[in-house]
Image: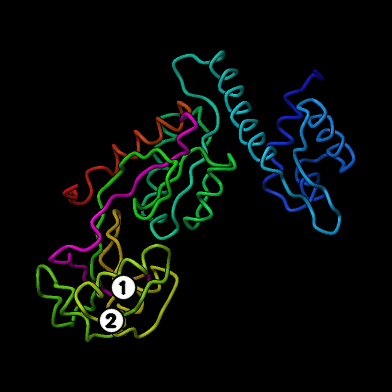
Amino acid sequence: MTDVSLRQLELFAALPNFATLSAAAAHLHISESALSQAVTSLENAVGVQLCVRRKARGLTLTPAGQQFAKQARRIISETQELVLGARRTEELRGPVKLGCYSSFATNVIPELLEGFPRRHPGVQMEIMVGTNEELLSALQSGHLDVALVYNVSLPLGYRRRKIYATELEVHLHPDHPLASASTVDLADLAGEPYIQYVATPGTVNVIDAFTALGLVPRIETRVSQTNLVEALVGRGVGYGLLMSRPNRLPMSTEGRPVVRRPLDPPVTVSHVVGIWPEDMNLTPRASALLDFAVEKLGGYGRTDPA
């Protein structure tokens, strides 16, 4: 059997992230012909076609190629850990790549990015903020070690660790009649103008909650940023429904006061969780980062009944 080098595995492991061989070559700082030769050499070694290379249609991995790339990423990761482990003393060293769902990133990333490197100065943190789809894709491609997401509508194939409890809450202008109540019934909001936060899977969950009560919300406008929801609430345009988050001031980004109240009965009570592919082992650095996240954020919110 033809020898396979670690460099060849590194090159092939990166291919699923690119539509063409030329784009992959440019990113990997290698000539397209050299990359093509590396792929051909791998195919000769394993005896199966790993990808289809057509100039008109770009680059497509075969099913065997997709599995090969996945296993190659695991080998690369384990090799990196082997080298780091041989150097390791008491101190953690090396990179950790953390993904975070965009709607609560500003509420958790600053605390983690400030505190974790202080505790583990030998660790270099890399942060990616994105949608569920973007984070799951990055986890599968090996671009992330772990991601923080809502424990809602997640696909199979991921291990999970709870970070903090979260639930849907209403955001109100201080002059709103319901702002003086300690809790708010979702049914009392149906006739009020609603600033809808549009995101997956939150939008569907909220609409389903209204539907379960036989109600249809009166949507005033739809926006794709939580900060914009709070800004509009602060100006009295309507109310918002957002998942509770730590490290927040009772005001919008414009400095206008916003009142937040829990819903009673509760709706969408869940957790923010750290997730990673079940066929991948967490690095010691990623595991320590989750430990730190639980330490700093785990006391927030009320635990769900599940």
As drawn, the label of residue 207 is: 1
The amino acid on which the numbered mark 2 sits, given as a three-letter code, is Pro
Residue 226 lies, in percent from the top left, at 38, 68
Looking at the rendering, which quadrant does residue 210 occupy? bottom left
Residue 97 lies, in percent from the top left, at 52, 39
- Looking at the rendering, in which quadrant would you find the N terminus? top right
- Tell me the CA gap for discs 1 and 2: 8 Å
Which residue reaches farthest right?
Answer: 33
Q: In this view, does 145 lie to the left or right of 109?
A: right
Which badge, 1 or 2, comes first in the chain's sequence? 1
Which residue reaches farthest front?
Answer: 48
The amino acid on which the numbered mark 1 sits, given as a three-letter code, is Ile
Tell me what residue is drawn at x 23 percent, y 56 percent. Answer: 269
Which segment is the magenta one? 253-282
Pointer 2 local density, CA inside 10 Å: few below 14, some 14–19, many at least 20: some
Tell me what residue is drawn at x 23 percent, y 76 percent. Answer: 172
Task: Using the image, determine if residue 42 lies above or below residue 225.
Answer: above
Element class at badge 1: helix
Task: Using the image, determine if residue 86 lies above or below residue 19.
Answer: above
Q: Does the magenta stretch include residue 292?
A: no
Residue 57 lies, in percent from the top left, at 80, 58
Check whether the beta carbons of the residues at disc 1 and disc 2 lie within 8 A of each other: yes
Q: Does the magenta stretch include residue 280?
A: yes
> Which of these two is toward me, 198 or 2?
2
> Which of these two is toward me, 246 or 20?
20
Residue 227 lies, in percent from the top left, at 39, 69
Tell me what residue is drawn at x 30 percent, y 38 percent. Answer: 294
Q: Mark 2 points at which residue?
A: 217
Tell me what residue is drawn at x 85 percent, y 59 percent. Answer: 56
Looking at the rendering, which quadrant does residue 244 occupy? bottom left
Q: Which colour scheme is used?
A: rainbow
Q: Is residue 235 left or right of residue 101?
A: left
